[in-house]
Amino acid sequence: MKKNLFLVLVGLVLTGTAYAASVALSPISVSVEKGKTFSVTAVVDPAAAKIYTAKIELSYPADVLEVTSFSFASKWMALSQEGYDLVDNAAGSIIKTAGYPGGLSSKQSFGTITFKAKKSGEATIKVSSGTKLFDASSNNVSAGTAQVAVVISAPVVTPTLTPATADEEQASPVVTSTNLGEETVVTEQASTTEGLEVAGMQEINVNPDGGNSLLAQAFSLMRGWAWYIVIIILVATAYVIGRRSNN
């Protein structure tokens, strides 16, 4: 008889624990950069009993995280009074309370909390013992705990590229060519980025057949002076012959 009673009591305890209402947090882990924000959703699971009022309290390390905003999910009616509605970033605590018209009979989002990562490191957001889920008889049927593991990394620094100044730019070569008969000679002359012109670097063609070459111009000048030289020679010869004839 005593053994049967003991089994019944154990069964009732296990049954009550299995069907106890609870609060879950989603996601259960977060990776974020320092200075960035992220959101955590609190979800109420009524299990076997309808939940008419939920008071959810979360704790977090105030030196690492801070709450920037909170928003209730649809249909919840906020209860704003002292002790039931609080955001304390100095102590690292947030409390939000609301009623659900007609009672909540299935798992549903309670609200979303937005946090800011204040510095690099690790932090844990926990459902505190002050959390309560009330049934139709105003009995607290909440059980279990939940938490979120947060890993905060240092921000990634992207290097800024600074345009090079004129003094830092490398000189680029200027290539000129000289045509010597059938051969071409290539000469490199350094130029600067300051826009300085390089004097005296011209393409010179010394092929006698080229009308624009220096040698061709010399031949042209010589052909022009040849007639004067011939005339002078003829005049001088005639003068000499005349004098010899007179003698």
Image (cartoon, rainbow, N blue to C red):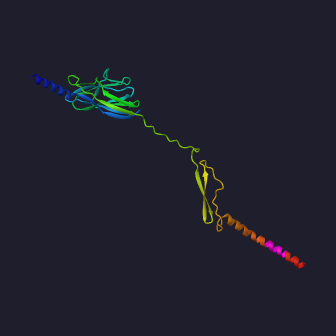
- Is 246 above or below relative to 97? below
Position of residue 18 measured from the top left corner of the image (x, y, whole percent): 20, 29
Rendered image quadrant of residue 217: bottom right
Residue reaching furthest to the top: 82
Q: Is residue 238 magenta?
A: yes
Could you say which is closer to the camera, residue 15 or residue 90? Answer: 15
Side of 49 relative to 84 (left or right): left
Residue drawn at (88%, 79%) of the image: 245
**Residue 214 seen anywhere in this rendered image of the structure:** yes
- Can residue 19 be seen in the rendering of this structure? no
**Residue 148 appears in which quarter of the rendering?**
top left
**x, y percentage for residue 49?**
20, 28
The residue under the point 86% across, 77% down is 242
Place of residue 150 in the rendered image (x, y in percent of width and height, measured from the top left)? 35, 32
Q: Is 27 rendered above or below residue 164?
A: above
Q: Residue at x 80, y 73 (%)?
A: 233
Number of numbered tags placed on the structure image: 0
Left or right: 3, with 80 as reference point: left
Q: Position of residue 177 (x, y in %)?
A: 61, 59
Q: Quadrant of the C terminus?
A: bottom right
Magenta span of residues: 231-239
Name the quadrant containing residue 37: top left
Could you tell whether 76 is left or right of 172 in the image?
left
Question: Does 89 appear in magenta?
Answer: no
